[in-house]
Image: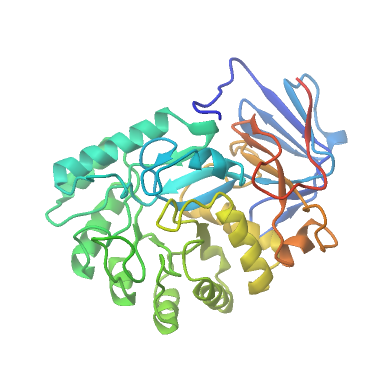
Amino acid sequence: MAHDAPVATGPTKLVIRNVGLMLSGAMEQPILDADTVIAINGRIAAIGRGADLDTDHATTVIDAHGTVLAPGLIDSHVHPVAGDWTPRQNQMGWIDSTLHGGVTTMISAGEVHQPGRPRDIVGLKAHAITAQRTFHNFRFGGVKIHAGAPVIEPGMTEQDFKDLADAGVRLLGEVGLGGVKDGVTAKQMVAWARKYGIQSTIHTGGPSIPGSGLIGADVVLEADTDVVGHINGGHTALPDAEIRCICEGCKRGLELVHNGNERSALFTLRTAREMNELNRVILGTDGPAGSGVQPLGIIRMVSMLSSLGDVPAELAFCFATGNTARMRALDCGLIEVGRVADFVFMDKAQHSGGRDFLHSIQLGDLPGIGMTVIDGIVRTGRSRNTPPAEKVPEVVGG
């Protein structure tokens, strides 16, 4: 298992050729008319037809062999603790395993499963800063984990949020998992966080772990966090009327998670579509959690929402890539010039009843993953977790 991320030792030029279908991650143009991508020093430099691009002097050449190229998937809701181990399930290797599910970036919603998690203000700040530093410094398999997400507690002041921001913290853990559960206090602290460039999310629905509690639509709307965390419950969802109230009462991100209520996820999706605001839909797993680790959780959500929610597969992939990247101000998640070169190669699973890759997703099948690339460097080959793909890419030069 790859632990610390491989790094380039000099200038690099990655050429990906013979792409059969290129998914951009952007809802306004989800499919690109291109078969070749060039990345220089880990960033996308050109996209187009191979005959029109300068593919000479590549340090790495990947022949996609007609497979599908998409931005690396983003998990908007994870709970990391100590490297690639989770005490929640006493399981090793969950990050590496999730990389084999096509996820190249993860966002912490709080390091809440840390045994003895400090709840005093000095301790929670130190805990968050430590998590931010450790996951920045030590990337398992190259996966980017944006961590260091403190759970707010009563008594915090504006200075505490400034201190956190000055130390490099850019996220709040789920509002409601700590002692702050009322809308008035949450609204003030979320505003302080926003003032200093810290993005926020909120626990939505019934309690999930000891210390958490019911967070209903009234608190969600008053707190006004940047993301409505697991609007379909983590695990227990709010009534449909409250979910609709949240969707209509704010313009924030609507996060659907694997570890939530699937019927409520589909209800949220239909509501967002009625409002013509599918750009607000983002995906997470909410793992590791009591239900375990879900290495294929994001790709399962894409397939479930496409097949049962009647969403074209190319748009459903945007929920797991470009929508999240734009909402969370990430430089990945889209295949466009200037973005980091984080990719997942996929193809129709062997023996799927789908006519082609997109149709197989819309039928509810999972794709086969053939390779992942992060920062222009190949990280994994054929996935050990997905069904085998009909076609797989191959490194043919460099």
Q: Give the farthest residue toward the left.
A: 155
Q: Nearer the viewer, residue 204 or 208?
A: 208
Q: Is residue 367 visible?
A: yes
**The C terminus sits in image quarter:** top right
Residue 135 lies left or right of residue 178; in this view the side is: right
Q: Which of the 4 quarters of the picture holds residue 133?
A: top left
Q: Give the farthest residue toward the bottom.
A: 241
Q: Give the farthest residue toward the top.
A: 10
**The N terminus sits in image quarter:** top right
Q: Nearer the viewer, residue 334 or 354?
A: 354
Residue 264 lies left or right of residue 47; in this view the side is: left
Residue 149 lies left or right of residue 44; in this view the side is: left
Up the image or down, 8 lies above or below 75; here it is above
Residue 271: horizontal and vertical position, in percent?
53, 78
Q: Is residue 27 visible?
A: no
Q: Which of the 4 quarters of the picture holds residue 45?
A: top right
Q: Nearer the viewer, residue 47 or 307?
A: 307
Residue at (52% x, 54% y) in the render: 324
Q: Nearer the viewer, residue 229 or 38?
A: 229
Up the image or down, 99 lies above or below 255; here it is above
Up the image or down, 154 lies above or below 97; here it is below
Residue 265: horizontal and vertical position, in percent?
52, 71
